[in-house]
Amino acid sequence: MPAIISLAILLVLFALSELIALKTRAMISSVLALAFLMLIGFWTGLIPATSFDDTGIKVFGNLMAGLLITSLGTTLDFPEIKRQGKVVAFALMGLLGSSLLIFLGGKLLGLQDFALAGLPIFAGGNAATLVITSALEGKGLETVVTFCIALLILQKFVGIPVASYCLRQEAKSYLKRFRSGQAETSVDTNTAATKRKLLEIPAKLQKPSTYLAKLALVTCLSFYLSGLTGGKIHFFVVCLLLGMFAFALGFLEQGILAKTQSDGLIMFLVTVLIFSNLSSTTPEMIVSIIFPLIAIMGLGVLGVIVMGLLASKVFKTSPYMAIALGISCTFGFPTTMLMPKEMATSIGSTDDERQAIESYLLPKMLVAGIVTVTIASVLMAGLVIAYF
């Protein structure tokens, strides 16, 4: 199939997923809808398995992911991070709950290998999966390897609905508080806009090309700094941190990606790239490991929910928010960014309400995703491979 036709199909499916989310008022999130549409597309042959290579999305999408995460750093200033201490606690407690239940339940069900291999994957994404599957190669554990790949792909289908429901309830609750004037609001950074920052560039020089160039420079620096650590600090983590520093110094503007006038295309590339692994998933693969897959995913989700309910009692906060933050490990970025935006669009009635909901949910979900997917899961994978 010509690359332009493959690209057109992916763009149409991406648009359809957003329409589904809009029509269902985010009860079916665009990410979940896109995952189902793409899975059906691959299984029916509508989308060729080579689409991501043919269109260049795999290469270009990975490149754009760095720019996107760097830009996210401009949404998280240092006072915001200090305020997110509970978010980090909720995310880590969710991981603890899922890990304990997966490990203990796996032993009781005779699925110890699946449970151990699945622990870091349930806690994260591609990086953790790569570490685990590389360690299992050549050790006669092909079924476990297949399980790991399937878990990486399919855990989104259980994590996203849980998070979508919880975020929807939280957004509704927050909107009631906002309308009554009792809602907490994010720090207004506009008051500081009159004071020139150290590396701030004059407004007359700011153009979409300038914004893109600055994002690329910070992302490049992140790449080299991550390399200096031997990859121990993930590239994306450095992108986020340097984005925060660059924003604090004035080199990057708040919400800079939207100013580039290319944010829609970048979001498409990075979002579609999440599901590139679906091209290699077959019905036969799913059937062969269906029991351990259901068991591990079920135990993991149950562990997050139980720990989220406990955390909400300890910290006297909403159980919906605690569970949503904990379950973010099953999908990570950029879904942690897409879902709050989606909830704001569907729940809010005015621009002010939408902005308030997004400002309330987005920083929390971003921090939770970074803590679980990017940091904790890779550390867990390093510990687990010693068993195999």
Image: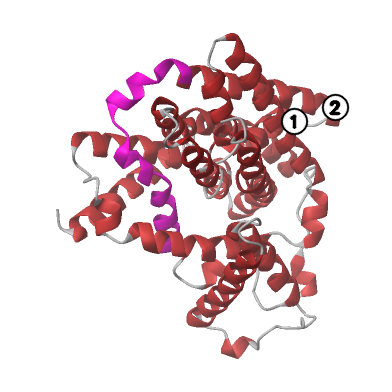
Q: Name the residue under label 2.
A: 314
* Relative horizontal placement of residue 269, taking residue 319 as reference (left or right): left
Residue 286 at x, y = what percent? 35, 24
| Residue 294 position (above or below residue 155) | above
Report the magenta stretch's main SS: helix
Q: Does the magenta stretch include residue 109?
A: no
Q: Which stretch appears magenta? A: 264-292
| Residue 324 position (above or below residue 220) | above
Residue 232 occupies which quadrant of the picture? bottom right
Residue 374 at x, y = what percent? 61, 48
- The outermost residue toward the top is 108
- Quarter of the image with the C terminus is top right
Query: Gap in Å between the C-alphas at discs 2 and 1?
Result: 11 Å
Q: How many marks?
A: 2
Residue 155 visible in the displayed image: yes
* Residue drawn at 57 percent across, 60 percent down: 69
* Relative horizontal placement of residue 287, taking residue 172 as reference (left or right): left
| Residue 94 position (above or below residue 234) | above
